[in-house]
Image (tube, rainbow, N blue to C red):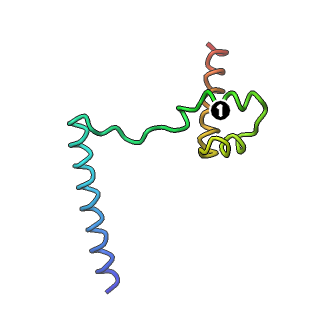
Amino acid sequence: MFTVIGAVATFERELMLERQREGIAKAKAEKRYKGRKPTARERAAEIKTLKADGVRPVEIARRLGIGRASVYRVLGAEARAGMNLALG
């Protein structure tokens, strides 16, 4: 009995995802689909300034209201860019 219910639920989920993909494709074709606006990249300058002032990444995330991982992502991108310049 549970196997049948699980199969029906899986089928419904697949149908829902298919409709979602079709809707996104249609919106992209009409140039209306833009996706989620990036939040942390927009505030990269603030993140770098706070880090230069000696503020820890967890505190930066709390002050700016963004995720800790986003802070590390911005700081990591900066560090990788610096390495590429040093190696090049």
Choose between 86 and 17: the one closer to the eye: 17
Residue displayed at 26% across by 68% down: 11
Which secondary structure lies at badge 1? helix
- Find residue 13 and report its horizontal and vertical position in percent: 30, 65
From the viewer's perspective, is 83 left or right of 28? Answer: right
The answer to which quarter of the image holds residue 81 is: top right
Residue 35 vs 10, above or below: the answer is above
Which residue reaches farthest right?
54
* Number of marks drawn: 1
- Find residue 61 and report its horizontal and vertical position in percent: 65, 43
Choose between 60 and 88: the one closer to the eye: 60
Residue displayed at 72% across by 43% down: 59
The answer to which quarter of the image holds residue 32 is: top left
Which residue reaches farthest top?
88
Residue 17 vs 24, above or below: the answer is below
Choose between 69 and 87: the one closer to the eye: 69
Q: Amino acid at mark 1?
A: Ile
Residue displayed at 71% across by 45% down: 58
Residue with the mark numbered 1: 47
From the viewer's perspective, is 7 left or right of 88? Answer: left
Residue displayed at 41% across by 42% down: 36
> Callout 1: 10 Å neighbours few (<14), some, many (20+)?
many
Quarter of the image that includes the N terminus: bottom left
- Find residue 57 and report its horizontal and vertical position in percent: 71, 40
Quarter of the image that includes the C terminus: top right
The answer to which quarter of the image holds residue 65 is: top right
From the viewer's perspective, is 79 left or right of 36? Answer: right
- Find residue 7 and report its horizontal and vertical position in percent: 29, 74
